[in-house]
Image (cartoon, grey):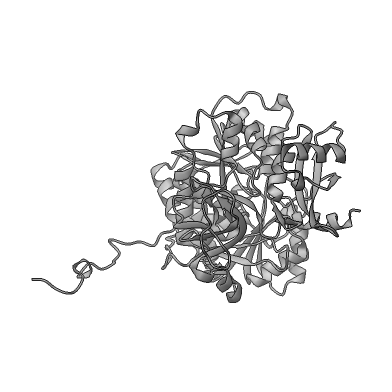
Amino acid sequence: MITSQNPYEIGLDKNQANYAALTPLSFLERAAFVYPDHTATVHGDARRSWSETYTRCRRFASALQQRGIGKGDTVSVIAPNLPEVFEAHFSVPMSGAVLNAINVRLDAEAIAFILQHAECKVVLVEREFGALVKQALEMADIDPLVIAIEDFTFTEGEQIGSITYDELLLEGDPEFAWQPPEDEWDAITLNYTSGTTGDPKGVVYHHRGAYLNAMSNVVSWDMGRHPKYLWTLPMFHCNGWCFPWSLAASVGTSVSLRHVREEKIYDLIRAEKIDHFCGAPIVLNMLNNAPDEIKQGIEHKVKVMTAGAAPPAAVIQGMEEMGIDVTHVYGLTETYGPSVLCAWHDKWDDNSIEEKARLKARQGVKAPMLEDLMVADPDTLEPVPQDGETIGEIFMRGNLVMKGYLKNKPTTDASFAGGWFHSGDLAVRHEDGYIEIKDRSKDIIISGGENISSIEVEGVLYRHPDVLEAAVVAKLDDKWGEVPCAFIKPKPGASLTEAEVIEFCRSNMARFKAPKVVVFGELPKTSTGKIQKFVLRQRAEAEE
């Protein structure tokens, strides 16, 4: 009998047997069941298995619920990369609450805004930031439960809180029967943007996106089984690009690093046989320029994933020459961290190391779990031609795009106009479809009617043998409107002049793109290693 109704919908309903909401919490449960004795976390001499980690997470989630914390509540954490922060990525959402990992480099006023805007009910604080959080709480009109995270390797600072993390664990049930989210669209974490042009915006992640980006990391980076991962990337930054959940999915080992120091990084790579770590280009540059004696003795394969500012090809080349394989990714807080990557092709293997570095410096193509990616006119949404020349804005859509901005519908609606997420980043698309960022929309330099990419100029500067760090911003000019202004930190012992730098650029790129002003000194950075160009723009205008 033929029916007009779709036969694939008759009696084939969604039910408990054939459907479960996606959540990265399921990765932890599986890791503890399948590999209970495999090492999950390392911090100094302390090591815990996946079974122990799962028990601690269940205890903490249980203790939170017993204190009335549940769905719709926010639990904030202000701490360095420690096992307790790793655990919070599971335990807080297991209680039904939302995790809010806060940038530890923010000032008290910014932290106070975040805590109040998020209506924080609980805040976990490590003693290095105790005085800062105390000051923030005095500014905010909230009274959260303050829990002290104790790190046996660090004794400075001021411990605050009415109870310690370990004391709270004792209140919880080790067999706590936590429940997955009712809906995979439920919020799992809250991450705030930097707020360099106003108050920070609260970016809401959902369980589905966290699950899919965690798996996207595993697939796109070939993490395999039991990777050993070093935390050079802050866990407060897009939830560590979702790698706490990726490590549970791949049953890896999370190795803590309290402060990013080149000698400690190399020591841990050797001692713990680290095979994966993430870091901003500035971290890679630091490792490139470390003394040769601390680089020795790494005889196993190491992979690094980098993003943030576009890494100059020279920085990638330096890492590759040390035998460290670089994967370049791109994303924003609004896209769970990396959602675009420079996927490698075997046919590129025979290229020179310089050409490989140039190819890897491109942002690339959509990650496995991103639905769509385009470079288009920001007004018409018409895709730009794949000519490597025409600049447009990067747009994304799919499951790796945030739920939206907390309590900010107008900005949410604007960012999703036309059914795409508007990144604000400007790029070209090459003939092979790979995208390459040319600038943030606010960082492009328009000189005499010509667009100059600050990233392109920086790439040339990094090729100079005496340049350690470089950044380029626009400086107002009576004749040209804007001209490039370069800020440079020379390598130790190097002697550079403005004239030498300008001539080097003129010899390696179109002359009109060369900096007209060069300033030497330290470059201001965020906690994730990004150079603060808004500070440099202010400095540029003060230069004669």
**Position of 284 relative to 25 (above/below):** above
Looking at the image, which residue is at 73% across and 72% down? 140
Describe residue 453's horizontal placement relative to residue 482 as left or right: left
Q: Nearer the viewer, residue 42 or 532?
A: 532
465 vs 449: above or below: above
Q: How many marks?
A: 0
Say if 287 sits above or below 64 in the image: above
Where is residue 178? Give x, y as percent. Answer: 44, 61
Work out which quarter of the rendered image holds the N terminus and state it. bottom left
Which residue of the protein is positioned furthest toward the right in this rendering?
Answer: 544
Residue 166 pos. (x, y %): 60, 53
Residue 105 figure quarter: bottom right
Which sits in the foreground, 199 or 537? 537
Which one is in front, 72 or 442? 442
For the question of whether residue 71 can be seen, the reply is no
Picture coordinates of residue 35, whole percent (x, y): 42, 41
Residue shown at the point (66%, 41%) measured from the top left:
312
**Looking at the image, residue 431 lies above or below residue 391:** above
At x 61%, y 32%, the residue is: 354
Name the outermost residue toward the left.
1
Residue 41 placement (x, y as % from top left): 55, 43
Nearest to the observer: residue 262 or residue 8: 8
**Is residue 352 in sight in this rendering?**
yes
- The image quadrant of residue 477 is bottom right
